[in-house]
Amino acid sequence: MAGMIRDIDNTVSEGNPMSAQIPDSHRDLLEGPIIVSLATHMPDDTIQVTPVWCSYDGTYIIVNATRGRQKHKNMVARPNVTIMAFDPQNQFRFIEVRGFVSNITTEGGGESMNELALLYTGKPKRYGIEAPPRAVDERVLYYIKPERVNTGG
């Protein structure tokens, strides 16, 4: 099922099987504690841009968000997204990744959020509290497959 996108409600839509590589020269912008901008398409086809934490596993950019929020609804219904990150030490160094959400899952969402919290805040638990993941909110992982990459700096 190459190129297929399966959302958490088990509906299927076509995706683009083409992919692009993240250059080693800019991987740090997706692996470090840099807040990135996530652009998604609203139902009226306007763009929503949200600051998010992310990780990169060498294939996918992984965004962790709460089920039911607008960005969740947007990525489930319209999986084409853009991620933009700027180097906080050099405003001319950036990476823009256009891609599509190829997988959406709740599996590992809470654990991933704790890992991101440690990376971004230095605290071992999300929001700095001890709580079972479902007691706070339901976390969802969105795996974004790069289709086009632009870099600068």
Image (cartoon, grey):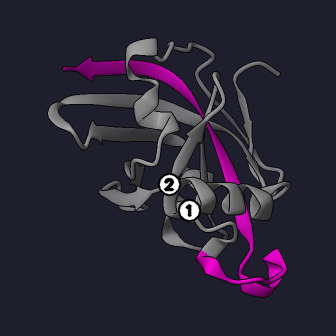
Query: Amino acid type of disc 2?
Result: Trp
Corner quadrant of residue 6: top right
Alpha carbon distance from label 2 to label 1:
13 Å
Judge left or right: residue 117 versus residue 25: right
At x 40% / y 39%, what residue is drawn?
82
Q: Residues within 10 Å of mark 1 (few under 14, many from 20)?
A: few
Mark toward the viewer: 2 or 1: 1
Q: Which mark is residue 122?
A: 1
Give yes or no for residue 38 being in the magenta stretch. no
* Image spot of residue 122 (x, y percent): 56, 62
Image quarter of the C terminus? top left
Magenta part of the chain: 127-153
Q: Mark 2 = which residue?
A: 53
Q: Residue at x 58, y 41 (%)?
A: 55
Circles 2 and 1, Cβ within 8 Å, touching? The answer is: no
Residue type at mark 1: give it: Gly
- Give residue 148's mark: none
Residue 1 image point, x, y percent = 83, 22
